[in-house]
């Protein structure tokens, strides 16, 4: 899984627009704050758990679709007609299309959960970052990564101040070890269109399952 960058979802700034003219600009490394609070790792672990759950559901679906495919082949018998062969190919294409749709849906669900978790953290951190900025006489908080900050003095960096206030506010989290990643499900394999090849593939599949 790619490293989570909390700042990648930033628009421009954490800011109190109404008071933007009255104070200076503070700089915040939101990724550093997320790491210090354990939030970055917590999000990573939570997403791995969710990914494993989605993969398990996809594997169940994969097994059901594979059984359906084998049923079509068995119904065609040892010597399928040309029409039955075409039906086998069409069924395989249809089942693969359905599997790919469900896989894409699972990926979208995972991406949406990632965005939700990051936004939840940003919303919680916003008033704390503004509080840290105001303590230094500043009213605007600019994130260090997005947009890029060309240069700034150490005095305007409120990263550590924000992390300390956030920890005092109970935002620090304890993270358990990430679960092992479950294997990803794959598209439905196309069985041979009739004949001994189809039966051989079915037997090979059963033998592999026993292993």
Image (cartoon, rainbow, N blue to C red):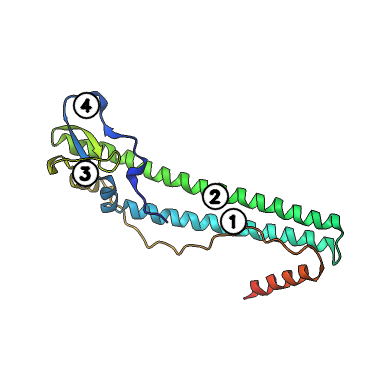
| Residue 124 pos. (x, y %) | 31, 40
Residue topped by disc 4: 20
Question: Which residue does the numbered mark 1 point to in the structure image?
Answer: 58
- Label 1 and label 4: CA atoms lie apart by 50 Å
Name the residue carrying label 2.
106
Q: Earlier in the sequence, mark 3 or mark 4?
A: 4
Q: CA distance from mark 3 to mark 4?
A: 19 Å
**How far apart are the alpha carbons under marks 2 and 4?**
42 Å
| Residue depicted at x 34% and y 55% | 41
Front-most of residues 184 and 93: 93
Q: Quadrant of residue 155?
A: top left
Q: Residue 90, position in %: x, y?
A: 75, 52
Which residue was labeled with disc 3? 162
Please provide percent x and percent y for residue 105: 56, 47
Of the numbered discs 2 and 4, the one sitting upstream in the chain is 4
Could you tell me which quadrant the N terminus lies in?
Answer: bottom left
Q: Are marks 2 and 3 in contact (CB under 8 Å)?
A: no
Q: CA distance from mark 1 to mark 2?
A: 8 Å
Q: Are marks 1 and 2 in contact (CB under 8 Å)?
A: yes
Looking at the image, residue 163 lies above or below residue 193: above
* Dot 2: element: helix
Provide the secondary structure element on which disc 4 rests: loop
Classify mark 1: residues with Cα within 10 Å, few (<14), some (14-19) or many (20+): many
């Amino acid at each position: 899984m790619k490293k989570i960058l909390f700042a990648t979802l930033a628009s421009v700034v954490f800011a109190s627009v109404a008071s933007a003219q009255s104070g200076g600009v503070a700089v915040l490394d939101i990724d550093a704050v997320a790491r210090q609070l354990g939030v970055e790792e917590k999000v990573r672990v939570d997403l791995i758990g969710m990914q494993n759950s989605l993969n398990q559901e996809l594997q169940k679906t994969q097994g059901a679709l594979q059984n359906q495919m084998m049923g079509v082949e068995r119904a065609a018998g040892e010597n399928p007609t040309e029409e039955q062969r075409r039906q086998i190919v069409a069924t395989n294409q249809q089942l693969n299309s359905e599997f790919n749709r469900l896989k894409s849906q699972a990926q979208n669900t995972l991406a949406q959960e990632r965005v939700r978790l990051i936004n939840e953290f940003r919303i919680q951190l916003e008033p704390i970052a503004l509080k840290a900025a105001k303590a230094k006489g500043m009213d605007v908080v600019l994130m260090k990564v997005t947009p890029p900050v060309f240069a700034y003095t150490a005095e305007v960096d409120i990263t550590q101040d924000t992390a300390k206030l956030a920890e005092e506010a109970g935002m620090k989290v304890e993270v358990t070890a990430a679960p092992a990643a479950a294997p990803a499900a794959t598209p439905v394999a196309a069985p041979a269109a009739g004949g001994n090849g189809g039966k051989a593939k079915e037997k090979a599949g059963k033998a592999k399952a026993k292993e």
